[in-house]
């Protein structure tokens, strides 16, 4: 009698996971792989749009050299945007955690408050945001009224004053982009057993001690998720200076699609390196905590 083959739990989970991501893999192979390859090819070429189609002439690394050595704007805009990201991401994550802790409390209309904080994620689009920016709705009027902007400009070097002022002028926008992160933290907070809080309260733990000893270890994996999500969300924001510069260069005769593709690949590489650094930092901390816990 032929023996029936049984899958163990790990293999069943692996197959289930593969089935879930298989639509994305198929979509990537069918619609994205060739455009990505062609974009990379264009970044090493001078691209001409002719009546017969797209003509590419290989020029090696000239586009990349021009971006770093000759373009007067690209490096400056890229560095400013990286500084903006370094400052904005912690603000978004801390604000999202703070709001999630507040609306996770047993208060009336808790569902309404959750909807209010998530609503900007739904209604904001490129055109909506441009209109809000043009009307000054994303900035805080008190910054100019009380001279805070001038104080920062006089106190810090231009290299850091610029990104900080940029963040303060878009502060409401940054808070608007915290909706998804708040939901992720709320999902993490649901993992905390209420009996744990009750036991800690009986033992005399203060709210601050409960936060550090109970809540923070539980939501720590979700902090990493939110940092990664926030970084990607900021970098793909269509109104940032680097993406605008890439789009503008696509239609310039002197640069064209080849140079724009090179800028896009540099931009992608920067995002990739930053994400790898974040993952390495947090994975090391996870290992440290495991060792400390086991020791």
Image: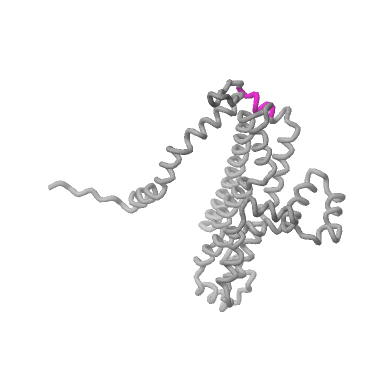
> Residue 231 versus residue 274: which sits nearer the camera?
231
- The residue at the point 55 percent across, 32 percent down is 39
**Figure check: 52 above or below 180:** above
- Residue 44 seen in this snapshot: no
Q: Position of residue 285 (x, y in %)?
A: 58, 51
Residue farthest to the front, as pictured: 51
Q: Position of residue 50 (x, y in %)?
A: 58, 24
Looking at the image, residue 91 sits to the left or right of residue 16; the answer is right
User: Residue 65 in magenta?
Assistant: yes
Task: State how the image is colored.
Answer: one colour
Please count the marks in the image.
Answer: 0
Magenta segment: 60-66
> Overall secondary structure of the magenta stretch?
helix
Quarter of the image for residue 267 reads: top right
Quarter of the image for residue 54 reads: top right
Q: Position of residue 48 (x, y in %)?
A: 60, 24
> Residue 71 versus residue 53: which sits nearer the camera?
53
- The residue at the point 72 percent across, 57 percent down is 138
Quarter of the image for residue 70 reads: top right
Q: Position of residue 86 (x, y in %)?
A: 68, 48
Looking at the image, residue 118 sits to the left or right of residue 71; the answer is left
- The residue at the point 74 percent across, 56 percent down is 135
User: Residue 215 in magenta?
Assistant: no
**Figure check: 156 above or below 34:** below
- Residue 54 seen in this snapshot: yes
Looking at the image, residue 295 sits to the left or right of residue 250; the answer is left
């Amino acid at each position: 009698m032929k023996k029936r083959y049984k899958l163990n739990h790990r293999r069943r989970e692996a197959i289930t996971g593969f089935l879930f991501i298989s639509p994305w893999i198929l979509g990537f192979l069918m619609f994205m792989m060739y455009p990505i390859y062609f974009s990379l090819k264009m970044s090493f070429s001078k691209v001409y749009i002719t009546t017969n189609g797209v003509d590419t002439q290989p020029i090696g690394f000239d586009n990349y050299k021009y971006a770093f050595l000759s373009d007067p704007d690209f490096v400056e805009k890229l560095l400013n945007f990286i500084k903006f990201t370094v400052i904005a991401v912690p603000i978004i994550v801390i604000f999202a955690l703070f709001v999630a802790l507040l609306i996770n409390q047993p208060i009336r209309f808790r569902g309404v408050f959750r909807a209010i904080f998530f609503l900007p994620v739904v209604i904001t689009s490129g055109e909506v945001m441009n209109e809000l920016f043009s009307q000054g709705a994303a900035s805080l009027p008190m910054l100019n009224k009380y001279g805070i902007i001038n104080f920062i400009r006089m106190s810090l070097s231009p290299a850091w004053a610029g990104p900080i002022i940029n963040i303060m002028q878009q502060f409401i926008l940054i808070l608007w982009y915290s909706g998804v992160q708040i939901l992720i933290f709320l999902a993490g907070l649901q993992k905390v057993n209420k009996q744990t809080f009750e036991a800690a309260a009986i033992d005399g733990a203060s709210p601050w001690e409960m936060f550090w000893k109970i809540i923070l270890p539980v939501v720590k994996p979700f902090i990493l998720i939110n940092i990664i999500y926030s970084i990607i969300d900021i970098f793909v924001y269509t109104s940032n200076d680097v993406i605008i510069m890439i789009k503008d260069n696509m239609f310039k005769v002197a640069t064209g699609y080849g140079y724009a593709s090179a800028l896009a690949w540099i931009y992608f590489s920067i995002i990739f390196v930053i994400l790898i650094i974040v993952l390495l930092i947090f994975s090391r901390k996870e290992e440290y905590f495991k060792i400390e816990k086991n020791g």
